[in-house]
Image (cartoon, helix red, strand yellow):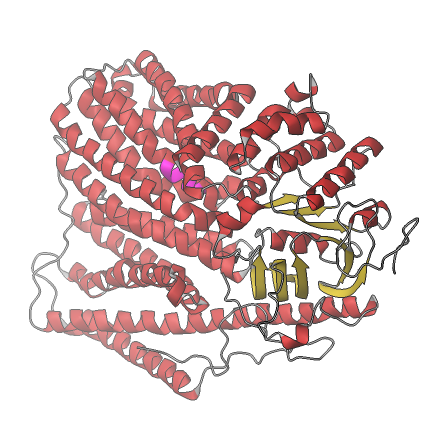
Amino acid sequence: MAPAALPPSAVSLRDAVALSGRFPLLAGVDLEVAVGETVLVEGPNGAGKTSLLRVCAGLVPLASGHLSVLGLDPSRNRVGVRRRVGLLSHAAHLYDDLTVRENVRFAVRAAGGDVARIDPALERWGLVGRLAKTSAGKLSAGQRRRVALAVLTARWPELWLLDEPHAGLDASARLLLDQAVRDAAASGVTVLIASHEAGPVEDLAGRAVTVTGGRVTGTRDLVPVASPVADLGDVAPTDGPVAHVA
Amino acid sequence: MTRDLTATPVDGSAATHPPAGAATNTRVSAPPTPSTSARRTERTIGLLALVGTAATVWLGLWVTPPDKVQGDLVRLVYIHPGVAWVALYLAFGLAAVASLLYLWPRTRSLFWDRLAAAAVEVGVVFNICTLVSGSIWGKPTWGVWWAWDARLTSTAVLLVLFLGYLALRRVPAEPEVRARRSAFVALFAAVDIPIIHFSVNWWNTLHQGATVLNANLSPTIHGSMAWTLLLGFVALTLVFVWMLLVRYRIGALEDWLAANELDLALAERQAEGVAAGGAPVGSGPTDDFPTDRVGVA
Amino acid sequence: MWRDAMLVAGKDLRIEGRSRVALSQVAPFGIVALVLFAFALGPDRQTMARGAPGLFWVAVLFCTVLAIQRSVSVESSDGARDGLRLSGIDPAGLYLGKAVAVAAQLVVLEALLTVGVVLLYGARIEVPWMIAVSCVLGTIGLAATGTLYGALSSGLRVRETLLPFLLLPIAAPVLLAGTRIWQSAMAGGVPAQGMQWLRLLVVFDAVYLAIGVVLFGPIQETA
């Protein structure tokens, strides 16, 4: 009569409050994300989406509440959490004086990643040839984002936190990004995507949570498009062209 | 000795626990008012300090005899060693120990941070008094306003380190961040001062051909002078304690004010969400989960 | 920890190799300082020769402040500091790596300044190995304390004015010891006295390196 074990949750937040000085970034967030889920975090600017991702990455400590990432407590097991989590933020964390290749190499090695995966990652994002040898300071915003994505795909951590991933990318890069997210989901990686614009991002996720005023104020199920994994949350079976379940 | 300076517990941590169910669920806590026993203690100490200092002044300036060698100048002995003891050992030691206790996870509490900051601030005052009184004493005795001996130099360096500590505290930051930063600086200073003292001592004694200034100003003390000296020590210590208590209380009030701004901000922030359309809900069965508090990192 | 340290040191030194800030800005500043000291002390070569040890170490302290500022500001480009935290790199390794990089730059600067002092002030060195060892040990101490305080003040906008104020009193023993060792190693000095100061430097270095390795992690999370 033993109950079925709950699927392990990748991210678990309960009544989480996070501060920046006196300002509450998160004002009591409750969120559960299961392993392998792809969740879209949406909401207006300033709602707390970026803060939510940063909290999950262990960058911002909680003032109160409960947080567990991949079964670990970020405030106790900092290194353990950070090695398993990849955050794609607005800034690309690059050193202007180093080349693209050197930046990726440093970032991957610093995170304890596999050096052999660097070249395939660079190729994947089109950072080859002359571009690979360019100093990071000379790159455009879109190119910097590609470099950050190369680091992410080379590391391939268990939890991906993507903050407005489409911003600054051209159309071809967006397609590459979507494909990368799908590949990640297929390999069992948990993905959280924060975006303030609806649209193409919804195709990737199985669920969307709305964040406003530092709290989770809504949730809805989505049907991911062309996703090889079928069992994500409450997905209504459909045939033919897939429709969004509001 | 434990002092209960707050009636309502204000430990300085950020958010107060929200009662469940309310849409904007924060409440503003009452300002920390010291209990009557604490207020009485503070007042008693202040009174004793005042009486002690007055007695020291009277005894020191009129009753005790002048020294054979130093004359009336010796009367500074009732003040100078006293303020030096407070500044160098009492204030500094207290700040260092309090900072250590703050950083130690088990005893971490903003009480220690506030205590350390108060000790440093009052310590700065006493430190300057030490340097000035020492300088006044030194000029007629050695012929110079300043001597580079270990004690004086260490006192001066300590002053600079104290000022650095206070400068760092003025940088706006959340109380826990500020507390940690200050505690680290205090700790490093605590490590540095013995090294400086030792080095300067060496510096003076090993320097070939240098006249080693005997900065020991202590004359021979006996009889009524000894009692007055002791009284001076006690009185100045009481002055320090009283100033510490007052400064601590001010610090607690400042922190309460800042924390209250947070609760108001929390309420406003949540109202944002409510206005945007949607009562706060969890993404799962949150009502069944007990909320456990995570301590401030 | 050592692997991470070498990784970070290599990164910092490679950046220095590309941008050449230490070489083109800090080194000339050191030379300018030496020249200014000469102006301040007057043309009497005897005075300058006697003051050479102290002036050398004061110039080194100024260069240290600049080097530390540079080491910290490298990490503020594009949020690189966040990137380092996110990578889960061992904080002790990060500390040692940055300290090693700063130390390497300082050693080169000191060699340059030593030549400058010999040429400009007419200082005569009798026991070169003591000079060299004092520079190495002093550099380790300066790099250890400087990296520590750099991290403590890294998030602050007033870092430029606050860092020297905080760092220099802590670095004062290095100045004391370095000057004494130099004096004992120059013409007219007693080398035996310098040995005791060398021992002090070793203790100083050990203490602050230990503090840095242990506390750098918590400090990093604070800023």
Q: Quadrant of residue C64?
A: top left
Query: Which residue of the protein is positioned furthest toward the top in this rendering?
Result: C119
Please, what is the dominant secondary structure of the magenta stretch?
helix
Residue C178 appears at what percent x and percent y?
26, 30
Which of A22/A27 is in front?
A27
Q: Please determine whether, in this image, residue C184 is positioned above or below residue A233.
A: above
User: Measuring 49% from the left and 33% from the top, which residue is drawn there?
Assistant: C71
Q: Please determine whether, in this image, residue B101 is positioned above or below residue A243.
A: below
Residue A44 appears at what percent x and percent y?
80, 56
Quarter holding the N terminus of chain B is bottom left
Residue B192 appears at what percent x and percent y?
30, 47
Q: Is residue C156 visible?
A: no
Which of B90/C141 is in front?
C141
Say whether residue A116 is left or right of residue B183: right
Which of C69/B119 is in front?
C69
Which of B92/C1 is in front?
C1
Say whether residue A211 is left or right of residue B40: right
The range drawn in magenta is: C144-149
Query: Which residue of the protein is positioned furthest toward the front in this rendering?
Result: A1
Q: Is residue A203 visible?
A: yes
Say whether residue B260 is left or right of residue B136: right
All told, the count of numbered labels is 0
Q: Quadrant of residue B56?
A: bottom left
Residue A22 appears at what percent x and percent y?
62, 62
* Residue B277 covered by magenta stretch: no
User: Measuring 43% from the left and 88% from the top, which residue is drawn there?
Assistant: B36
Q: Please determine whether, in this image, residue C63 is positioned above or below residue A232.
A: above
